[in-house]
Each structure stands twice: as structure tokens, then as C-alpha cells.
Image: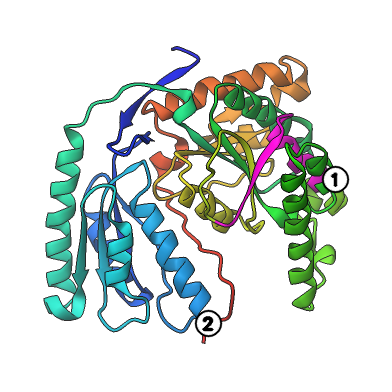
Amino acid sequence: MSMDSFQGYMRADGSVGARNLVAVIPSCGCSQHAAALIAAQVRGAALLNYTGGCGEIAGDMARATELLAQYARHPNVVGAVIVSLGCETLDAHRLAELAAGGGPVELLTIQELGGTARTVSRGVDLVQKMAARAASLEREDCPVASLTIGLECGGSDATSGMAANPAMGAFSDLMVAQGARVILAETSELLGAEHIMVDRAATPDVARALLSTVEDCERWLKATGEDFMGKQPSPGNVRGGITTVEEKALGDVLKGGHSPFVQVLGYGQRPSVPGLSFMDTPGNDPASVTGLVAAGCQIVTFTTGRGNPMGNAVAPVVKITGNARTWAHMGADMDLDASTIIAGSESVEQVGARLYELVLRVASGTRTVAETLGHEEFSMLRLGPVY
């Protein structure tokens, strides 16, 4: 396999897909079941498990509308069917308008169609037709520079900072060298390592944006009245050998390698320039990955010392562990073993190169373990309460 290309699907807008999926998108929690029934009946359908749509503040409604539309326009998505109840607060017609621009978009309304069964029947027919059209598309040679890669970690332990995260950093540097877009995330889990990020900022504006993002996160956490520092590291992190939130942060930042930070992104915001960016996401794994994929990440790489099996509805999630016991015990949920670094049989650079080659294979069609197991975790960051 070439080190500077992969076999992907060229889209009309110039983006490149690693998968051909039809997104099935409920516009509220009350239409989620009908959407799930549709997605379950068609191979190649991807359910976005959204359960909001009512009883939320205006900011959350606006965010949900835009983020769901971004999933419909994702490079890995060839069409979308939006399933509405008909009386929710979220404007499903506006969602359908914003979702346009990629593949075909259809809106189904349960109250107009006459109930769940009729909606599901119509939805299955539409998704099948979109999937059939997608099956005729062929992969072709595409540059690595057309990839956007998300960097995530979860269920971390001491081996994450010792092996898996440094290997991901080496992989990240290889991607950046090819002109790809790479996104580091999880603001709350980088508290204590922000000085390293600021030192690597490409410009003074990026440095200021990084500091502002971290400071805003700290203010928000303190405003809740919760003792965040008393809850970090998590109980699982502690059992895995991590002693302080600062140690966790220093291990976390290693995922970004040595490249300069070129952009600071809001939650779900697409990077506009190649290189390493930072996205303001929560440390919660499903919510963070959901934001990364909304930003156009065709693939997410995910290190986990203790073993987290989660995936995503439209983007393959590649799992890497640096813990030999986790690889032996939960290997059926993992894609790559980085514990060879600790054993001394491979270097950080060698494992990073193996991850790079694996990601190109995944981008070319090789399925990840999370895909094979059907993981479709989806969780959107909310700004306010549900009322």
C-alpha cells in the first residue's frame, strides 16, 4: 500500500469518504424508535441515536440542528432520512434544509404518515434505494491529505501515557506530514498540560485561543459547584495507576505528537487548514467523539488502557491499547496492540507507523472491531438543562 494515498470515495464537493452510509436521523426522542427500526432493516444504514428535540434551551436546539445536519453532510454519508414526530420543538424542515448539499435527503413525519408502521415501511424503502445507489460507487486512489482524523482516549491507565498515546503522537505527526487534518480534543482532561500546548501554538492568536478555551472550561466547571479536581482522575484511571489529573493531562497531550497547533475549534467545528488542531470538547468519550465526527473526521483513533469498546455511527473508530493484559483479555474489542513498546520489542515510532498503515487500510475499507460489533454510540454535548 502507498504511504501517501488510500482507496476512498470521491464526493462531488471534493471531500473523500471512507464509507458509504445512509444516515437515519430522528429529530426528537419521540421519533427515535421509528428511526431505529428503519436503520435495523437495511445494511449500510447508520442510526444517529438522538433523543432531544424538546424541552431544551434555544442554544441546544440550534446546536443539535446544525450538528445533525453536519452528520448528514459527512464525507462517509451518501444520503439521509430524517424521521420527525411532527410536533417537536426542533424544526425538522430546517434540519432537512441544512442537511442538503451532500447526498439526497428525505424527511418523514410520523403524524402525517399515519403512525410508526407506515413511517418505518416508507423509511426502509427510501434507505434501501439510497444504499443501492451507493453500492454502485467505486473506490479510487485518494491522497492522505484528504483525511481528517480525530484523536481520542478513554478508559486510560498508566500504559496510555507510557505507550499508546506516544504511539498515537507518532502517528499524528505522520498524518500531519502528509497534509492531513488531525484534531486533538477533550479540554477538561488537558487541564495541567495547557502550557505544553501553548508553547506549540503556531501563532500568538492560536496561543491566546488555547488559553481562553482552557480558562473557560475551568470557569464552567467551578460554576457547577462540583469538585472536578476531586473527580479526576476517575476511579478507573486510579485503579489503572494514574495518580493525578496533571499526570493524566500530560499523558493525554502526547496524542498530538510534536506538530504545532494551527487552529482552535469549537465543538463540532470543521478545521479549515491542514495540520494539528484542538477542539473544545468534554472529556466524556461518546460526546467528544460525536463532536469530532461532526467536524468531518472520516476516522477516529482511540487509545484505551483499561478497554473501552465504543464506536460511532458514521466513522470507524480504531482502538489502540498499550496494556498487554487488556490486549489479552479484551483483544476482541481492540484493533492494535501498543504494549510492545513497554515490552521493548518495538519503538514508539514503529508502533506509530503500524497505526498509520492500519488507518490507511481502514480508510480503504477494512472494518474496525467496533464496526463489526455494531457500536454506534452517539451523545451530543448540551449547554443547558432539559425542562
- On the rendered structure, is 127 left or right of 208? left
Q: Nearer the viewer, residue 63 or 151?
A: 63
In the image, which is nearer the foreground, mark 2 or mark 1? 1
**Residue 103 colored magenta?**
no
Span shown in magenta = 248-267
Position of 79 relative to 202 (above/below): below
Label 2 or label 1, whichever comes before in sequence order: 1
Quick check: marks 2 and 1 in contact, CB under 8 Å?
no
**Residue 258 colored magenta?**
yes
Residue bearing mark 1:
195
Query: Which quadrant, please, contains the N terminus?
Result: top left
Q: Position of residue 269 (x, y in %)?
A: 53, 52
Position of 260 relative to 206 (above/below): above
Position of 341 relative to 114 (above/below): above
Amino acid tagged 2: Val
The residue drawn where x is 72% and y is 46% is 206
Q: Quadrant of residue 211?
A: bottom right
Please tell me the numbered disc located at residue 386. 2
Q: Position of residue 229 (x, y in %)?
A: 84, 63
Q: Secondary structure at mark 1?
A: helix
Can residue 34 be seen?
A: no
The residue drawn where x is 24% and y is 47% is 103
Q: Residue furthest bottom?
A: 387
- On the rendered structure, is 293 left or right of 277? left
